[in-house]
Image: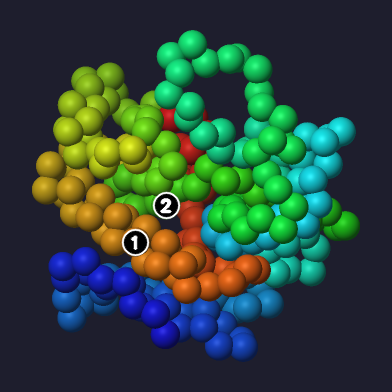
Amino acid sequence: MEATEEKERMILISINDFEIRVALMEGLRLVEYYVEDIDKRRIVGNIYLGRVKDILPGMQSAFIDIGLERNAFLFINDVLVPENGNANKSKAMPKIQNLLNKNQEIMVQVTREAVEKKGARVTTQLSLPGRKLVLLPYSGSLGISKRLEQSERERLHGICKSLKPKKMGLIVRTAAENATVEELKNDLDYLQSLWRAITKRRENSSSPQIVYFELRSEEHTSELQSH
């Protein structure tokens, strides 16, 4: 069992051979509870510590071992490109063979389920969804749901610009409509504590290993695509 705690919030995760159980606690109060059968679980949103098995320069892609039956597929557009600090950055996309090395350990997040003989598709651009916010650990951007009215978008942008962690990004979800500063801060505190737990597990794990189970909603998926 694992526990991730920040102030009075705690996530409890129990995993056995048959099911995954996740409980979200606020103090002694159970807020949310999920049970998922191992045989029926979806893996979209899960984060894995994987290992680069093969690099395909001709396809500008790579196969990543994440511990599943088939290796995951990582395309060049889904590889996080390090910032070089140069204001006059080249518009040309770097070659994947210059970004990855064979046998390199890498954290990836599943964006598409495996189908037929194809492995899952993954990205290195990680995201962690909360109730009102989505934390982007490797991005400095700030996005607001387009489903919100313009005046509310501007209000939330002003609040979240001051809350946004340095060197991290945020997406403000539709559910953040009319949220107070305290509510947004509490959600962000929870997501940052979750990210610390993920990085700690990554440091104490060897690949391939799952380091985060995603409980993803359709709303979260659409907001990541359209913010």
Q: Residue at x 39, y 26 (%)?
A: 146
The image quarter in which residue 40 lies: bottom right
| Rendered view: 144 above or below 65 | above
Q: Nearer the viewer, residue 71 or 187?
A: 71
Q: Position of residue 78 (x, y in %)?
A: 63, 38
- Gap in Å between the C-alphas at discs 2 and 1? 12 Å
Q: Residue at x 19, y 39 (%)?
A: 163
Indicate which disc, 2 or 1, sits on the residue closer to the N terminus.
2
Q: Which residue is mark 2?
A: 128
* Left or right, 43 with reference to 35: right
Element type at marker 2? strand
| Rendered view: 84 above or below 220 | above
* Left or right, 29 with reference to 24: left
Which mark, residue 196? 1
Q: Amino acid at mark 2?
A: Leu
Q: Residue at x 34, y 61 (%)?
A: 196
Q: Position of residue 34 (x, y in %)?
A: 44, 73
Element type at marker 1? helix
Dividing the image into 4 quarters, which one contains the N terminus?
bottom left
